[in-house]
Amino acid sequence: MKMAELGEFGFIDRIRAGVASSAETAGVVRGIGDDCAVLELPPDHLLLTTTDMLVEDIHFRREWTDFANLGRKSVSVNVSDVAAMGGTPHHLYLGLAFPGTLPLEQLDAFVAGFLDACRFYQVTLVGGDTCSSSGPIAISVTVEGSVPKGRFVPRDGARPGDAIYVSGTLGDSALALHLLQEGKPVDPFLLERHINPQARTRLGPILSAAGIPSAMIDVSDGPVSDLGHILERSGSVDALVDEEALPLSEPFRALLQSDRKLLRLALGGGEDYELLFTVPPEREHLIPEAAQKSGLALSRIGVITSGSGILTVRTANGEEYRPARKGFDHFAG
Amino acid sequence: MKMAELGEFGFIDRIRAGVASSAETAGVVRGIGDDCAVLELPPDHLLLTTTDMLVEDIHFRREWTDFANLGRKSVSVNVSDVAAMGGTPHHLYLGLAFPGTLPLEQLDAFVAGFLDACRFYQVTLVGGDTCSSSGPIAISVTVEGSVPKGRFVPRDGARPGDAIYVSGTLGDSALALHLLQEGKPVDPFLLERHINPQARTRLGPILSAAGIPSAMIDVSDGPVSDLGHILERSGSVDALVDEEALPLSEPFRALLQSDRKLLRLALGGGEDYELLFTVPPEREHLIPEAAQKSGLALSRIGVITSGSGILTVRTANGEEYRPARKGFDHFAG
């Protein structure tokens, strides 16, 4: 069957069929099918909302991903932002613009991957919009979550003396992209980290419930850039990061041995979707329990000092340098 | 200045400068600038959320609109869905994908129009995402609103005996589009209705607070299609619409005199963003007060009967026909 035969409403019905009915989902009064979704927040919680766009040839390439993983990643990058506030994601909205010539099996694979990730993160698709486009595929995902009042973790709370922590390992996704761009073979672990990253939705609420982080962000643009956001927003602080303390995966270390320059990918590369957060000294003793509960390594990579927004990296032999702060700017000349 | 010089973050700062600070806006704990917006709902209210995409050459053409009105319309079509549930819109999220070559003054005009409409509807932009695209401009808008518990108006509540009402006038937007497509001159009133429609955000909550509608929808795909959604969702009901009762503007009537066939635009044409709702007989006496409070004409255009989802139109001389139910399907062959 082709999209032209199925039609817009047929496609929406197909999506709806894969979504659990409202009656089965806590907080969903009305899901897909009315002018708006109607939702109820848990009592004494704040609403957390974020939106992301993924555009073909900018955020993804058809030849480097499959549509099921593209669907999964569309969910992951979005719920990651809720985790980065210490909250729990609940509801998703999917906007989809694509050419009518796109094979229906690719669309079905995208939707299957998207709904698969919804189940994984225990979130529900409750609305969206589908339309045709003459150009590249454009995906827009909005997620709503919640956090108990007084528990959300902002970007602007880093203070001198705080330690800097990061979950999991850094640079895997950027290294995979680098190898793809160079046409080189990619280790399956690294590739998975790039095409199907997992948002740290368990860790975020564990950290906020324990009152551990003073500031938090997810690593989407790269640690240098994302830590930069924390410095900028917190004001009057610098950061000193230990190169030797950066948590690296085994496949990353293996390639690093033949090319030390790859280390820049662990500092400047994006899309790992790990959580990067600052911790006041008196709360650092709570880290091991949070690591154990979440099943993730939590690594101390540096410290916040008083200053003016400068990020310094210290190498193994004690030299210090300031890495170019350069996350991806969509329009930089 | 060009987008390449301003950069993504410069552009976001530019938008942020035009938005009232969180401190000034009720319910906004954190607006633009963190991983998520952080929001508080009014007590004992449900959350209403909807998302829409507008894609260049599908939803709009650069030569038929200006960017300021495109910005306004992006807000209007979205908040209209909240009004259609009987709710009040509060917060907006803007996703924007566009080529880096787009002149900055056009972007600025879009943002100015967008923020102008935000002020008009008393809603606040609290988040978004900006990225480059090699293809057509893609705009994604998500809006969150609220409605007192027990007051939201769904699509599925129409019952036999209910009267069918619509606000304002029908077909103006479709007539303007028709004239544009034919290359004919367009009356300024009709053009305004097409390029800068006003969502009925005052009327929606007035109707729901008074408990008037049993079902409601906004006229985006055209009355035949949108009333069709109400029939379909309500189940076991038909609708009989009086052609003579359709509320038409003076400019519409003037053109109708020379071409009776234009009447199909009042039935099948979309994008008027009026509210179409059904009213149980015992609540019809409340209509005049709601009309007066909202400053809008509310016209009784037909009646719901028991049946199986069939929409019948009765002409002035008593003939009856079933209009082809055909809203815009993005992928229909």
Image (spheres, coloured by chain):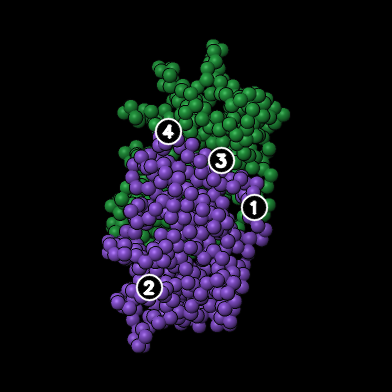
Chain colours: A green, B purple
Give the amino acid type for the residue marked by disc 1 in the picture: Ala
Q: Which mark is residue B26?
A: 1
Residue at figure coordinates x 46%, y 59% from the top left: B77
Of residues B187 and A262, the one drawn nearer to the viewer in this rendering: B187
Dot 2 surroundings within 10 Å: few (below 14), some, or many (20 or more)?
many
Q: Whole-percent x and y of residue A215?
A: 62, 35
User: Distance between the Cα atoms at labels 1 and 4?
Assistant: 35 Å
Q: Whole-percent x and y of residue A130?
A: 39, 56
Disc 2 is attached to a residue of which chain?
Answer: B
User: Distance between the Cα atoms at labels 3 and 1?
Assistant: 18 Å
In the picture of the structure, the residue carrying the numbered disc 2 is B252
In the picture of the structure, the residue carrying the numbered disc 4 is B5
Above or below, B142 against A292 in this view is below
Q: Which mark is residue B33?
A: 3
Q: Quadrant of the C terminus of chain B?
A: bottom left
Give the amino acid type for the residue marked by disc 3 in the picture: Gly
Give the amino acid type for the residue marked by disc 2 in the picture: Phe
Q: How many marks?
A: 4
Above or below, A74 against B172 in this view is above
Dot 4 surroundings within 10 Å: few (below 14), some, or many (20 or more)?
few
User: Distance between the Cα atoms at labels 3 and 4?
Assistant: 21 Å
Give the amino acid type for the residue marked by disc 4 in the picture: Glu
Q: Earlier in the sequence, mark 2 or mark 4?
A: 4
Q: Whole-percent x and y of residue A82?
A: 56, 44
Residue at figure coordinates x 39%, y 53% from the top left: B66
In the orientation shown, which residue stands out farthest toward the top? A317
Indicate the secondary structure of the residue bearing disc 1: loop
